[in-house]
Image (tube, rainbow, N blue to C red):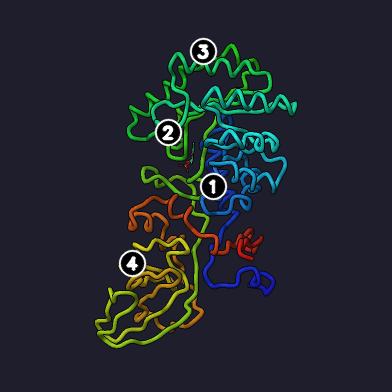
Amino acid sequence: MDDIWDLKVLRDTYLEIDLDQLASNVAAIRRHIGEDVALCAVIKANGYGMGAVDIAQTLIENGASCLSVANLPEAMELRKRDSSWPIWVMGHTPDRYLKVAIENNIELTVFTLSQAEQIQEIARTKDKIQRVQIKVDTGFNRLGFKTTRKDLKSILNIFKFPNIKVAGFFSHLALASYEEDLMQLKRLLNLKPYFETYDMERAVKYHICDSISAIAYPDFRLDMVRIGAALFGAKSYRYPDFPVKTIAKFKTRISHLKTIESGEGVSYDYKWRASKKSLIATLPFGYADGYPRNMSGQGEVVIEGSRYPIIGVICMDQCMVDVTELEGAHVGQEVTIFGSDAISIDEISQKSGTNKNEILSRLMQRVPRIYTKSGNIDHIRNDLL
Ligand SMILES: *Cc1c(COP(=O)(O)O)cnc(C)c1O
């Protein structure tokens, strides 16, 4: 790495993010869903740890028609970067912050009449037309209007507000079983005839799919799909051949090496003791970088193409690896923690008892992100500097 780049990293543990792979993942998803279905790129939680503002342009350039996030601060981070990106908050925006969203052209999610009334009032005083997505609870029981007569009446009223444009109706699948997912889909589609007369331009988008369902259920894609995990290469275990690949490699370098004698313990509580004379490498990453602490005793890293076990308890900032079998081990030697073919994010999530999204979205701010394009460094994000 050149010196100018190195000055933005300042540590040996970093995340390498391949923007070309991101572009090909988006292209693969676009091909799969077809021309008539819009692609909303979900980049909440700092783009699943990938750096929302750093990947947004690549997503837009490769066919994402909107960027969605969970909350208003996430939307504002994107808006500060680009005034033209279409940005939508999928979650709840508290009433007292609606004004900020409207002033910054951020699309909102609405699921009560009172929210809509306040949006109407603010938009009117600012002489704006505010776009909203109406959330419908078809059975997930998280957010949304129910499909009761009373709630349908509320939705009808929203269509009549002059300063609100209803841009979509959406719901979210529980993915518990196909039959129940189908029931949820039907509840959403049942609204269509009811509101068609109010959708003068036929511009209201209906959508219900996330990554898994967009891939699994072609008939559910409707007007748009909301894709997060698949953008970053996560595949459903049901579709191992879906042509997306992990875009991030989590890497570090050996910071120290020592030989210990049989019977010596390593790390807190001596949960691991050497059964013979052993060569131990110290690595400068720990659970405060986002690597799960419960990988202690079961995690492995890859050095020169082979696996080496993480031994003893993983510390906050460091962990130890048994490299007795590694010939020519040296300080500064490159180590892959996960993200390569050799050691997948899937493996880490399964061993640590969580899902891939949690592993990625918990990668901490203190891990610098190095973005590559055409084999070169495109830019580096280090939020600490
Ligand atoms: C997070 C989220 C998605 C994307 O889910 P993935 O499984 O990552 O594709 C879609 N819709 C909503 C409402 C979400 O909150």
Query: Circle 3 sits on which residue?
Result: 194
Labels 4 and 2: the sequence-earlier one: 2
Labels 1 and 2: the sequence-earlier one: 1
- In three-dimensional space, the C-alpha distance between marks 4 and 1, rounded to whole angstroms, equals 32 Å
Label 4: element kind: loop
Q: Depth check: 294 or 58 in front?
A: 294
Question: Mark 2: few, some, or many residues within 10 Å (few <14, many ≥20)?
Answer: few
Query: Circle 2 sits on which residue?
Result: 142
Residue at image position (27%, 81%) is: 274
- In three-dimensional space, the C-alpha distance between marks 1 and 2, rounded to whole angstroms, equals 29 Å
Label 2: element kind: loop
Residue 80 rendering spot, x and y as whole percentages: 69, 47
Residue 59 as seen in the image, left or right of residue 342? right
Residue 299 rendering spot, x and y as whole percentages: 35, 66
Residue at image position (44%, 19%) is: 147
Query: Circle 4 sits on which residue?
Result: 296
Question: Mark 1: few, some, or many residues within 10 Å (few <14, many ≥20)?
Answer: many
Residue 276 as seen in the image, left or right of residue 2? left
* Amino acid at dot 2: Arg
The relative height of residue 15 versus residue 112 in the rendered view (above or below) is: below
Q: Depth check: 383 or 38 in front?
A: 383
Residue 148 rendering spot, x and y as whole percentages: 43, 17
Q: Label for residue 25?
A: 1
For the C terminus, which image quadrant?
bottom right
* Amino acid at dot 1: Asn
